[in-house]
Image: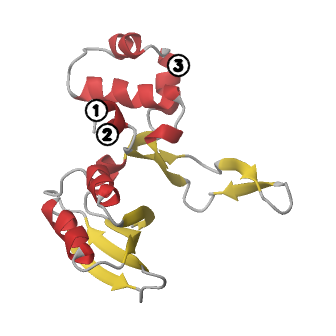
Amino acid sequence: MSADEKQTRQLYFLSGQAVKVHMLPAKRTGQPFEVNMESTGYFVVKQRALPEVLLKVVEAKRMLESEKVHSVQEAVDKVGISRSSFYKYKEDIFPFHDTTEGKTVTMTVQMDDQPGLLSDVLKIIAAFGANILTIHQSIPINGVASLSVSVQVLSTTRDMSEMIDRVERKEGVHYVKILAKE
């Protein structure tokens, strides 16, 4: 997997108050769905779904944190955004792994009913240093099972978005979805 492909699989949290997202029209009504996230104000979004300006804000923040640049102006010049864009969004977007330490992340994994696949998924989670709190696997239907896993993210846990990507790329896994982060 190239660096570009790996980068497109990163997860990000977006925050904001009363964020509304308009999605594709419903098949039956033709009307757009409207999701109002007033209760939490957070979304988990894959990198490929984000506007370029938000990704550049994250990159500018990384440059500043790693001291590759010495000022906000230098960072925004390098990534190609305005200072106003940086300040507008800098508190509203951050990589998923930056916000998970000390949290419980619950995810669902849709996977084939294959001997050893559950074990392989759990080994990936363990290899990244997350503490598995609960596991529930449904009875497979038509050869496919749903797995619900809650993990505690410790200070020693490696990059959660990379862990999720590794699980998602495992042969036999259909998808991984984040259900909650507490």
Mark 1, other Cα within 10 Å: few <14 / some 14–19 / many ≥20:
few
> Is residue 101 found left or right of 39 in the rendered image?
left
Where is residue 154? Give x, y as percent: 19, 62
Q: Is there any visible trace of residue 130 in the rendered image?
A: no
Dot 2 or dot 3: first in sequence order is: 2
Front-lying residue, 101 or 142: 142
- Left or right, 168 with respect to 92, comes to left
Q: Residue 165's x, y, as percent? A: 32, 52
Residue at 27% in and 23% down? 63
Q: Nearer the viewer, residue 129 or 181?
A: 129
**Real-space Cα separation, disc 1 to disc 3, in angstroms:** 29 Å
Q: Using the rendered view, name the quadrant where residue 168 is placed.
A: bottom left
Q: Amino acid at mark 2?
A: Lys
Residue 126, given in percent of the width and then of the height, sits at 16, 67
Name the element at disc 3: helix
For mark 2, what is the residue?
Answer: 6
Q: Which residue is mark 1?
A: 3
Front-lying residue, 79 or 37: 79
- Position of residue 140 relative to residue 33, above or below, is below
Q: Which residue is mark 3?
A: 84
